[in-house]
Amino acid sequence: MSQYIDQADVIVIGGGVIGASVAYHLTKSGISDVLVLERNELASGASARSAGCFTHSRSDVSTIRMINRTREAIAELEEILGEPFGFRQHGSVRAVFSEPRLQEMVAMEAVMQRAGLGVREIDIHEASELVPWLKLDNAVRTIFVPEDGYADGALLATSYLRAARLSGARVRRGVNVTGLIAEDGQIVGVETEEGPIQSRWVVSAPGVWGISVAGSINFGFPGAPTRSHYWITKPDGTGRPGQPNVQLPDVRAYFRSEVGGLLVGLQEPQSRTYDPLQLEEDMGHMNLFDDAYDLDLLVEQASALEPIIPDVVKWGFAHHIAGLSMYTPDGKFVVGRPDGTSGLIVAGGCCGSGLAASGGFGQVVADMISGRSPSIDTSLYDPNRFGKVEPASQEFRDRCAAARSSKSRGNLNLPSSLVAAQ
Ligand SMILES: Cc1cc2nc3c(=O)[nH]c(=O)nc-3n(C[C@H](O)[C@H](O)[C@H](O)COP(=O)(O)OP(=O)(O)OC[C@H]3O[C@@H](n4cnc5c(N)ncnc54)[C@H](O)[C@@H]3O)c2cc1C
C-alpha cells in the first residue's frame, strides 16, 4: 500500500470537541493508534463559539446520559492533566409561564428524575435569592436543576486532545480531508490534499462540514448548518460568580454569568441555515451577522423579556457572537454507520448541544469501534432514520431550521398572564 502517505488504526476527521472526545475515548478504551486530522486550528469551529451551557432538561434519557458522560470525563481529565478544568456546576433555574411550556417541562422533569438527576421545584423566593434580577411572580412553575452548568468549549476540546496524546494519539493540524476512500462500501481511509491516508476505521466529526465529507460517498448527512448567536452584556455585576444559569423557554431565552456580565442567548423565531456545499472552510471567515436585522431582533426579544427581567432595558450589550452548528429535523444527534458502509462512523448533528454531549459522543463511538455493548442507547441517533435526504435542498434546510427555532419550545408572543403583569 505504498501510495498511502500515512496510516492509522482509526482516523478522526475534525479537531473540534466531538473529534477530540472521540480520540480521548478511543485511547481510554485501549485503541491508541488514532490520528486526528484538522485542517485549521484545533477547536476553531463551533466549539470555540459555544455558549458552553450544560442543560439537562431533555425529552429523552439517552441525551441526559450523553451529557452525564461529559461531566464524568471532565473529572477524569482533571485527574489525568493534573489541573482544575473550571467546569462551573452552579445549576440552573428554569421557569415557565404558559400551559404548553408547563406540560413540556413536567414531562422533562420526569425524564430527568428517571435519569437520576436532582431536579426539584423551587418557589419564587428561592428563585429570587438565586437570581435577584428575575421577577417570576407570574411563573406557573419554576425548577432548579443542580447538575446544569457551563464550561469553555475550546478548553474542553484541547483538554480531551492533550489527554489522548498522552496515551499515544497523534494530532495533525493543517491537513484538509477532501473525501473518503471506499472499496465496495468498505471505507479504507481518507483523501487529503497531501495524499491518501489508510485506516481500519474513519470517524467523521467535521461539524457543519460533515455534509460535504459524507457527500464524497453519496451519503446525505441529515443536518443543516444553522446559525446560533448570543450577546454578552457589559460586566456591570449582574452576572455574579456562582449564579445559576437561567432558562425561559416561553421567550426562547437563556442566560449565564460571564465575567461579571451575562451571556444572553436568544433563539430566533426563524433560524438561518446555510448552503452546506458553499461554506467557507474556516468559520472565522464566515459572515454570520446581519447588523440591522440582528439589532431589531435584540430589541424585539429584549422588550419581550421586560415583564420577567425589568432591568433588561438598562443592560448594555458589549459583544455579539455567532456560529454555525448542525441541526437535524428532529433535534436529535447523529451517530453511527451510514447504511451500506463499513469502517465509517459519522458523529455530528449536535443540535447546539455538542459541547455538553461531547463525552457521550466519544463514549458511544469508542463502544462501536471496540465492539463493546453500547453504554448509552443510540437508537434515537441513527444516521439513516430520515431515509435518503438532500441536505442542500431548501425544503430539508427549512425542516432543520424549525428544529432549531423550537429548541426551547418557546413562543415570542407572551402569555396573557405575563402581559397583564406589566
Ligand atoms: C453560538 C453557538 C452557541 C452554542 N452553545 C452551546 C451550548 O451552550 N452548549 C452546547 O453544548 N453546545 C453549544 N453549541 C454547539 C456546540 O458548539 C457544537 O455542537 C460543538 O462545538 C460541535 O463540535 P464539533 O466538533 O462537531 O464541530 P466543530 O467545533 O465545528 O469542529 C469541527 C472541526 O472539523 C474541522 N474540519 C471540518 N472539515 C474538515 C476537513 N475536511 N478536514 C479536516 N478538518 C475539517 C473544522 O476545521 C473544525 O475544527 C453552540 C454553538 C454555537 C455556534
Image (cartoon, rainbow, N blue to C red):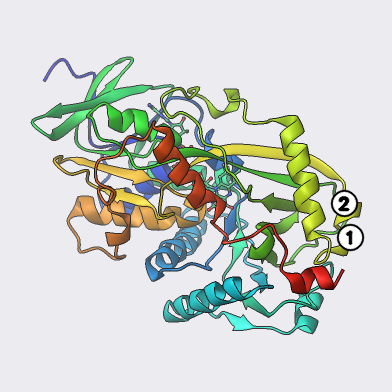
Q: Position of residue 48 (x, y in %)?
A: 58, 39
Would residue 146 be visible to someone looking at this image? no
Q: Secondary structure at mark 1?
A: helix
Task: Tell which residue pokes out farthest to the right in this image.
Answer: 314
Question: How many numbered discs sit on the rendered protein?
Answer: 2
Task: Residue under label 1, please give it.
Answer: 311
Q: Position of residue 330 (x, y in %)?
A: 40, 54
- Neighbour class for label 2 at 10 Å: few (<14), some, many (≥20)? some
In the picture, which quadrant includes the C terminus? bottom right
Task: Residue under label 2, please give it.
Answer: 315
Query: With respect to residue 240, does 227 lie above or below?
Result: above
Left-right relation of 239 to 314: left
For the residue pair 36 and 146, the one nearer the viewer reads as 146
For the residue pair 7 and 184, the one nearer the viewer reads as 184
> What's under tag 2, amino acid-wise?
Trp
Left-right relation of 335 to 406: left
Would residue 231 be visible to someone looking at this image? yes
Query: With respect to residue 46, does 306 lie above or below?
Result: below
Q: Position of residue 323 (x, y in %)?
A: 58, 37
Name the residue rendered at 54%, 76% in the picture: 103
Query: With respect to residue 319, does 176 lie above or below?
Result: above
Q: Secondary structure at mark 2?
A: loop
Name the residue rendered at 37%, 39% in the picture: 205
Name the residue rendered at 44%, 22% in the picture: 174
Would the CB of label 1 be found within 8 Å of ligand 1? no
- Neighbour class for label 1 at 10 Å: few (<14), some, many (≥20)? some
Q: Are marks 1 and 2 in contact (CB under 8 Å)?
A: yes
Name the residue rendered at 49%, 77% in the picture: 107
